[in-house]
Image (cartoon, helix red, strand yellow):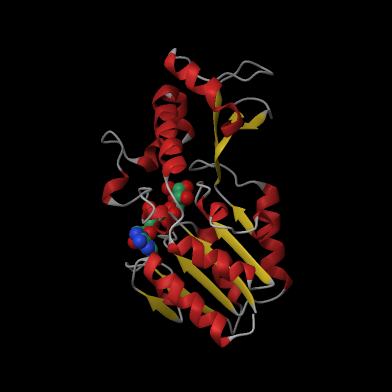
């Protein structure tokens, strides 16, 4: 079996992480899709950092849910497997998904990088330092060039990481998938739809897991209109029972 799984914010919703476009996504009455932009950061870096600090804290306290666990189980039982997640949280990893079988196409919320040079570092290791700066009302500065540090995620209108694109392209082009599962995403980005459709080729199945219809629904060979935490464990058990993956 060769399987591509694509996930979005809906998969972490049952862990208490608000989705971007859901009704609980607004933060201090602000639209997250407008905050996650280079323009918002240029205008008010302090506000954008406050939002990311709160999200980091919420993610640290959250636990993987049955959807993350089911995907990790599928990964461990499938040789040709890639998870392409748009989520910047670490819940897939904490559920046991091997890092080499996963691409975080929109980055990792715990990375912090310089807004000017190439310097970057993993935030969890510098948590204390950042919290102290925050209490003083300071924003993190690059130790190399003193420019403002920013969250190491991909914002709207920014380029995806080339190495990540390469990993997904390699997986998609090396041979067709028997199955593509798309769970918990509005699938608004052309590249996500493109990868899903190319990966399944002529004969692969495309299963969508989402309580709502999306722009991908018309291409799905099967739709599970349920929360991912209920649908994915059942689906994975069914798949692992049916196929010797
Ligand atoms: N199970 C499955 N799907 C769910 C659940 C659930 N429990 N709850 C909500 N959903 C679905 C919603 O119906 C919606 O289609 O999850 C989707 C969440 O959509 P978005 O908030 O748009 O998140 P996502 O598709 O991941 O956004 C993509 O856009 O904002 C940027 O970079 C950000 O990575 C993000 C990207």
Q: For the point 56% across and 68% down, which residue is it?
A: 73
Q: Is residue 80 left or right of residue 133?
A: right
Q: In this view, does 126 lie to the left or right of 80?
A: left
Pinpoint residue 153: horizontal percent, then vertical percent.
54, 40
Q: For the point 44% across and 50% down, which residue is it?
A: 63
Towards the viewer: 212 or 124: 124
Q: Residue furthest top?
A: 136
Q: Quadrant of residue 226?
A: bottom left
Above/below status of 163 relative to 242: above
Q: For the point 45% across and 65% down, which residue is it?
A: 183
Pinpoint residue 83: horizontal percent, then vertical percent.
59, 62
Above/below status of 198 relative to 21: below
Q: In the rendered view of the protein, which quadrant contains the N terminus?
A: bottom right
Q: For ligand 1, which image quadrant applies? A: bottom left
Q: In the rendered view of the protein, which quadrant contains the C terminus?
A: bottom right
Q: Is residue 98 left or right of residue 239?
A: right
Q: For the point 50% across and 63% down, which residue is it?
A: 69
């Amino acid at each position: 079996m060769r399987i591509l799984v694509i996930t979005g914010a809906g998969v972490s919703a049952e862990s208490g992480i608000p989705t971007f476009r859901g009704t609980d996504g607004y933060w201090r009455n602000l639209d997250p899709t407008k905050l996650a932009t280079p323009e918002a950061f240029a205008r008010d870096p302090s506000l954008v950092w406050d939002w990311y600090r709160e999200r980091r804290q919420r993610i640290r306290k959250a636990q993987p849910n049955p959807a993350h666990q089911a995907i990790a189980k599928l990964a461990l039982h499938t040789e040709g497997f890639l998870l392409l997640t748009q989520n910047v949280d670490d819940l897939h990893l904490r559920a046991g998904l091997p890092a080499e079988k996963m691409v975080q196409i929109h980055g990792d919320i715990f990375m912090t990088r310089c807004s000017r040079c190439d310097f970057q570092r993993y935030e969890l290791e510098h948590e204390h330092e950042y919290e102290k700066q925050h209490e003083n009302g300071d924003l993190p500065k690059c130790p190399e060039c003193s420019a403002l540090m920013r969250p190491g995620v991909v914002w709207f209108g920014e380029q995806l990481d080339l190495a990540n694109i390469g990993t997904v392209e390699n997986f998609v082009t090396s041979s067709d998938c028997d199955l593509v599962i798309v769970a918990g995403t509005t699938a608004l980005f052309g590249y996500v739809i493109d990868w899903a459709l190319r990966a399944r080729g002529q004969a692969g199945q495309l299963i969508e897991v989402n309580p709502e219809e999306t722009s991908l629904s018309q291409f799905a060979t099967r739709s599970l209109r349920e929360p991912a935490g209920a649908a994915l464990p059942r689906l994975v058990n069914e798949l692992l029972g049916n196929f010797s993956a």
